[in-house]
Image (tube, grey):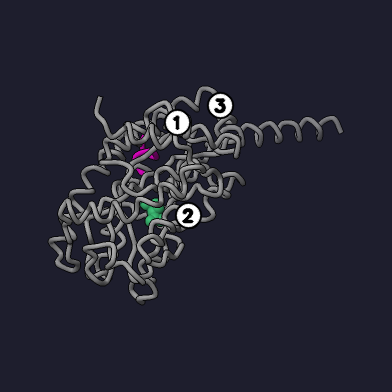
Amino acid sequence: MRKLITTMCFIFSIVAGALSAAPIEIKFSHVVAENTPKGKMAIRFKKLVEQRLPGKVKVSVFPNAQLFNDDRVLEAIILGDVQLAAPSLSKLETYTKKFQIFDLPFLFDDMQAVDRFQQSKEGQKLLASLESKGLTGLGYLHNGMKQLSANDPLFAPADAKGKKFRIMASDVLAAQFQVVNAHPVKKPFSEVFTLLQTKAIDGQENTWSNIYSKKFFEVQSHITETDHGVLDYIVVTSKEFWSGLPDEIRPIVEKSLQEAIDYGNKVALEKDEQDKLAIITSKKSKVIELSSAQRQQWKQAMAPVWKEFQDEIGADLIKAAQEANQVN
Ligand code: LMR
């Protein structure tokens, strides 16, 4: 009997040893193509972490909504089904209304202003604000400014009248199209191409890199360069997973993530130019450049959205974001 117990203890210690040596798995789920700022950032993160923590941490990246769609990924993080995601800031509405600030049309002059706001005291406070929901915001990641595509040329707000535009799940974005008498349709990113191709919708808003990598330009006759809003991401994990990481592992994961984000931001800048050029060169979709007077018309038409959401977002936060447009 004693021999049996000794043998069992021995087997148990081997199994326990093997289990404790198993690498920590980080599943990173996202919805875009690999050849995008987010796609490339995720691959860079995997490479850096696995180089620095060989056998200790394993990263599996699932692009193109292979694992979870937009509407499910945050829930999946909280449930522990995946450990990392980088949803667009427009998709946090069910968790907190504060991030709606990023959807206000014509708020930021350019991506440098977006960056200044994100790195400001207010931006960092926002990043930390998901803790009470069980989520830890690890950083912001850029994609770029949004453009409007449709199957007709859109020069003035009146040209959008009556058209159906796919939007991300955000009430601010819905209001933005309603004020120009268009019809917003909330749909996941993975459905956009088919909706456009089958003409179930007339248009959509997105960045150059998303329009290019998902081939929206092949099924839209025109793209108007409006730069009317920003599409950026929050890199997010669950509070439980993050605090449960061993103390000698967490800083290395965090450093790798920061470096991957810096790289992703560089890619975002480059792709914005490159992918716009590739679309123009393809001649599959005509790119419309607005005069400053035409752009001003869109800005004016969409201005009432700010008032509508001012109370929910907070006038002080809007002011802080506007101040980011000024270079100190
Ligand atoms: C979209 O749904 O249009 C974007 O959020 C997709 C993405 O992650 O860039």
The answer to whether mark 1 and mark 3 are in CB contact below 8 A is no
Q: Residues under labels 2 and 3: Cα distance?
A: 39 Å
Which comes sooner in the sequence, label 1 or label 3? 3
Horizontal side of residue 27 vs 323, given as left or right: right
Question: Where is residue 151 shown, x and y percent of the image?
Answer: 27, 71
Q: Name the residue: 31% across, 67% down.
A: 160
Q: Is residue 13 magenta?
A: no
Closer-to-camera residue (43/126) = 126
Q: Residues under labels 1 and 2: Cα distance?
A: 34 Å
Element under label 3? loop
Return the residue at label 2.
171
The answer to whether mark 1 and mark 2 are in CB contact below 8 A is no
Q: Which mark is residue 150?
A: none
Q: Name the residue: 43% across, 45% down.
A: 89
In this view, the mark in front (1 or 2): 2
Element under label 1? helix
Q: Which residues are magenta?
A: 43-48
Q: Which mark is residue 253?
A: 1
Which residue, as the protein is rendered here, is positioned at the far left? 281
Q: Tell me the quarter of the picture where residue 187 sits.
A: bottom left
Closer-to-camera residue (225/177) = 177
Element under label 2? helix
Return the residue at label 3.
246
| Vertical arrangement, residue 85 with respect to residue 322, above or below | below
Question: Where is residue 186 shown, x and y percent of the image?
Answer: 46, 62
